[in-house]
Amino acid sequence: MTLPNFAQHALYLATLGTALALTGCGGGAGALGGGAGAPSAPVADAAAYDDMMSYCGITAPTGMDATQDGWSSNYGVLQGAGTVYYGSTIISPAGSAHAWSTPLTMSVPFTNYKGVTGPVVSSGYAKPEWKMGVAIPTVLSPRSVGCVTETARVYTPPTIDLSPGYPTLPQPQSSLIWTSYWSSKVPVSQLQGTPVDGFELVSNFAPASGVVYFVIDKASFAAPQTLSICRLAPKATQWNCVQPSVADAGENWSVTTSSPAPGVYVLLSPTPQ
């Protein structure tokens, strides 16, 4: 069973600053145990366990990983129809009873898609600290599963393969699409502003507390106080946008809001499209 990797979490804690501490996730690297002050585990929807495990690209744990207290986590590349994107996953078949003071984090790379229209290609450069995702408590019910994946994905149509002798045709070009577990077409056009990037939190439980965060570069966002974090709840049609907290993180900004819940999150710029 994979328990918290403190070296990995240290990067997130350094960039998120004090925002995590304000949610009750803590700031150290110890186990708080299960005393009277420990948070209760959020209820997990066992009926959605297998389907979400498949969507998140998670292989069912076996052996001790399927029965031992704790959780397993993974980060890697996922594939959809014409898309390749990043995902960060957790699964806890037996539940996690310990309230670790270092939160459980799921994050994916952040890309500035502001103003992108028409054919696009995926950016070939990003700093490791440019991230978006969630940090949540480590107490989990049995059969808990979840993932954070990119919702803005570069779609590449199938290539046109012509037999010899036929005229050469232009190959289809890549384009940016917004898709999620709940909708093949996330309605970002409804947002009053310009979507920059976004992710989905797919889980069969609602975290008891935590932080939604975007770590973005200062060079591209000179006025972070004008940004919004917008959430589209599962199967909802209306967005809920809030003004986030902004913290200085050296060469970057840490843009956060509290109370993560399943759904799609988008960082929104006020600049009209």
Image (cartoon, rainbow, N blue to C red):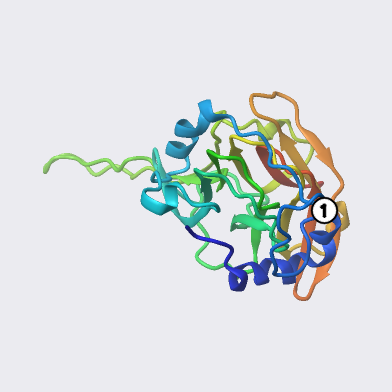
User: As shown in the figure, which amino acid type bears the numbered disc 1?
Assistant: Thr
Q: Residue furthest front?
A: 35
**Residue 130 sits above or below residue 92 on the image:** below
Q: Residue furthest bottom?
A: 250
Residue 218 seen in render: no
Neighbor class of circle 1 (other Cα within 10 Å; few <14, some 14-19, many 20+) is: some
Q: Quadrant of residue 224?
A: bottom right
Mark 1, secondary structure of its residue: helix
| Of 15 and 113, the residue lying toward us | 15
Q: In the rendered view, does 248 fall on the left or right side of 71? A: right
Q: Quadrant of residue 234?
A: top right
Give the residue at x 80% y 67%: 17
* Residue 15 locus on image (x, y percent): 74, 69
Q: In the rendered view, does 9 fall on the left or right side of 168? A: right
If the image is split into quadrants, where does the C terminus sit?
top right
Total labels drawn: 1
Give the residue at x 47% y 42%: 56
Give the residue at x 54% y 52%: 69
Mark 1 — residue?
Answer: 23
* Residue 54 locus on image (x, y percent): 42, 37
Residue 18 seen in render: yes
* Residue 196 locus on image (x, y percent): 68, 50
* Residue 193 locus on image (x, y percent): 78, 41
Give the residue at x 66% y 53%: 138
**Residue 24 sits above or below residue 262 on the image:** below
| Of 101 and 174, the residue lying toward us | 101
Q: Quadrant of residue 246?
A: bottom right
